[in-house]
Image: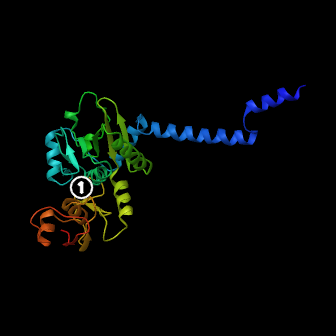
């Protein structure tokens, strides 16, 4: 008489204990992964701490005025970021950034447009402390030139491409990314040394490197003291997302010298093109 109720109870309990344990562990792992992914773009005080610590480690100055931004640009410590077929600048008062950040923008915008068909829209680059908006954190690294703001796209496809890319780079320790709500945008702080090492590894070493391991724009990795870069000559094969500016910066030469050496009248180059790079200054 008691066997039937026991059978019904066993059926309601579901799989055998071992099966239930495996199922619970799988669900717990999935929940944990989802929680991490959901939280990683939320930002935190710890994220701000890491950004400020990186700025100090690179000996970056927090620029206070527009004049300071112009002076750093004149010294080559900040480089101009220009709009193009892959990139739109919207409301950017100071279109300058650290060389590694400019390289990040160039690469990301090319990949972004290729992936989802839109131009990447950057809404802020270097921003002196005197021009910070009211809702900006007093610990923001925008005044150092190592941060950018990217517009939150209305395209679901573009967001689905961009957010995993930002999370992946953050997990590699080369950026800190936060999805801000008011107004909606992505705040991205680029760690110069780490990002340059990552690009070098991606590009496969000598001959095709996008950035030199020691100097960019005549400045050692992420400092505010210019020095003379190494002299070298190279034959360079243009890769997708490259520009004359990024190639010139990587090899310690000027765009004018690169254009002259290759008999280029304009700045248009294409993937697969072979350029002869003159010796650095």
Question: Could you say whether the residue bearing mark 1 is in a helix, strand or loop?
Answer: loop
> Residue 275 appears at what percent x and percent y?
21, 71
Let me know if residue 252 appears in the view: yes
Image position of 209 with respect to 147: above or below: below
> Residue 112 appears at what percent x and percent y?
30, 49
> Residue 175 appears at what percent x and percent y?
37, 47
Image position of 69 with respect to 247: above or below: above
The residue under label 1 is 225
Query: Relative to 4, is 108 on the left or the right?
Result: left
Q: Quadrant of residue 28?
A: top right
Image position of 37 with respect to 1: above or below: below
Residue extending farthest to the left is 265
Nearest to the observer: residue 220 or residue 145: 145
- Residue at 18%, 40% (x, y): give it: 92
User: Which image quarter is the N terminus in?
Assistant: top right
- Residue at 23%, 33% (x, y): give it: 132
- Residue at 23%, 69% (x, y): give it: 273
> Residue 16 appears at what percent x and percent y?
76, 39
Nearest to the observer: residue 252 or residue 110: 110
Image position of 73 with respect to 43: above or below: below
User: Which image quarter is the C terminus in?
Assistant: bottom left
Q: Quadrant of residue 145?
A: top left
Q: Residues within 10 Å of mark 1 (few under 14, many from 20)?
A: few
Query: Relative to 61, is 66 on the left or the right?
Result: left
Let me know if residue 52 appears in the view: no
């Amino acid at each position: 008489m008691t066997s039937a109720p026991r059978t019904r109870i066993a059926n309601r309990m579901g799989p055998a204990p071992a099966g239930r344990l495996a199922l619970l562990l799988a669900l717990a792992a999935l929940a944990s992964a989802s929680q991490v992914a959901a939280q990683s773009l939320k930002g935190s005080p710890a994220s701000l701490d890491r950004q400020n610590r990186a700025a100090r480690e690179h000996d970056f100055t927090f620029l206070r005025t527009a004049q300071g931004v112009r002076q750093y640009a004149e010294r080559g410590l900040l480089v101009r970021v220009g709009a193009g077929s892959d990139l739109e600048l919207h409301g950017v008062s100071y279109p300058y950034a650290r060389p590694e950040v400019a390289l990040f923008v160039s690469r990301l915008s090319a990949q972004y447009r290729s992936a989802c068909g839109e131009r990447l829209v950057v809404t802020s680059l270097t921003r002196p402390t005197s021009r910070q908006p009211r809702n900006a954190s007093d610990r923001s690294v925008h005044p150092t030139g190592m941060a950018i703001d990217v517009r939150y796209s209305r395209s679901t496809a573009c967001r689905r491409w961009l957010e995993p890319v930002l999370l992946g780079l953050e997990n590699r320790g080369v950026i800190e990314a936060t999805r801000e709500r008011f107004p909606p945008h992505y705040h991205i702080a680029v760690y110069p040394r780490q990002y340059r090492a990552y690009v070098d590894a991606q590009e496969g070493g000598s001959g095709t490197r996008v950035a030199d391991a020691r100097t960019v724009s005549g400045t050692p990795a992420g400092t505010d003291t210019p020095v003379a870069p190494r002299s070298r000559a190279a034959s360079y094969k243009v890769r997708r997302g490259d520009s004359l500016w990024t190639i010139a910066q990587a090899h310690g030469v000027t765009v004018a010298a690169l254009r002259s050496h290759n008999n280029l009248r304009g700045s248009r180059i294409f993937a697969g093109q072979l350029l002869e790079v003159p010796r650095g200054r």
